[in-house]
Amino acid sequence: MSTTRPILPEIDPADLLEQPIERASTIPAEWSWDPAYHALDREHIFARQWHYVGHVSQVPKPGSYLPATVAENPILIVRDLEGELRAFYNVCRHRAGPLATEPGCVNRVVQCKYHGWAYTLDGALRGVPHWDRVDLFDKKDFGLLPVALTVWEGMMFANLDEHPEPFDPVTAGIRERIAPIDLGALTFHSRLSYPIACNWKVYVDNYLEGYHVPIVHPELNKVLDYNEYVTETYPRYSLQYSPFRQDVDTAMYGPTASEAFYYFIFPNLMLNIIGGRLQTNLVLPVDANHCVVVFDYLYVNATAPEAQAQIAADIAYSEDVQREDIEVCEQVQVGLRSRAYRTGRFSVQREEGVHHFQAWLKGMYRGALAAAH
């Protein structure tokens, strides 16, 4: 499989140095608007990490399939006739047509939507219409290209790397930290997508601190106990944790909801866990100045009629919070491109998660530069 190596930007070595949060500066503004950094992110971060692509309940039976995107590459998750989950590039080996553009289910084969080449659910090429007199062609050489896939707590993760790193360290300790909450008991309810005029790193930075909550999210600030809001950092993720205030109604999250867990898993996945509900936020880069954030909602009682009003209230409330975040992130993107700003500083008390992410990002950039020399 061929890939194009991006031209690496010229990075000042001083910008790659890691400092304690008390002395550190934020990453340079151009890292969030220069197209050269978008290419660097795509090839050296997103193409080599594990990415959330959906929930197992979205491919419930043999023949079910779900399209997804990883590092701007289309992939397809399928459940084969034996019930095994598989992932392939969603790219026909003929002339790169798509096999699927929406979730669906088939009996035995998926068919390219361009010229009709047909593939079995294990990726083998089966049918090639109008193919007489083609020399030196063997269908065994034109099967779908596989993608590494694993499942954790019902969530599916894919990795484009031909030799992906082990998955277990990516989420090590989360299951134990949130107990007795059982993410594996949840099922998929719905998905919403939001196009945003900001770089993916701007959206991640915004997520990783509660510093802005009293200003940007006044209603959310009435729910969280801001004085008890803490950030914990780990090798592959960070956690923002807050108990709820004692004087607020949190019925929309279920009878056991008393605290919020906000996990960020490198490079682009948020897990918002409250009671019997999980909301995933997947940040997909589009270009240097745009991203799409995909929200999946999962519940213990996702299909129960008596739970639909509670679920609708939860989604509506989340939509309000998201609109507030979109507005401020788009304004920050404009500010980053202005003449007035290149780097800033961190709040030691409130921005540990941002500092942690940006230090990880610097490490990824240092690795990319080292590999290029």
Image (spheres, rainbow, N blue to C red):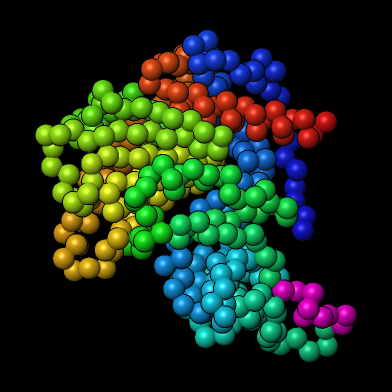
Q: Position of residue 47 (x, y in %)?
A: 64, 48
Identified at 47% across, 14% down, the residue is 345
Identified at 36% across, 27% down, the residue is 230
Quadrant where the C terminus sits is top right
Q: Is residue 303 left or right of residue 174?
A: left
Identified at 52% across, 86% down, the residue is 107
Q: Please name whichever residue, 51 or 2, is drawn nearer the observer in this view of the structure.
A: 51
Q: Please name whichever residue, 307 or 329, is drawn nearer the observer in this view of the structure.
A: 307
Q: Position of residue 193 (x, y in %)?
A: 38, 52
Q: Quadrant of residue 203?
A: top left
Range covered by the magenta-colored residues? 135-143
Is 142 within the magenta? yes
Is 79 within the magenta? no
Q: Quadrant of residue 99?
A: bottom right
Residue 39 shows up from this direction? no
Q: Is residue 317 left or right of residue 261?
A: left
Q: Residue furthest top?
A: 23
Residue 319 vs 189, above or below: the answer is above
Identified at 69% across, 84% down, the residue is 126
Quadrant where the N terminus sits is bottom right
Q: Is residue 245 left or right of residue 136?
A: left
Q: Residue furthest right?
A: 136
Q: Position of residue 4 (x, y in %)?
A: 75, 47
Residue 241 vs 16, above or below: the answer is below
Residue 161 shows up from this direction? yes
Q: Position of residue 228 (x, y in %)?
A: 28, 26
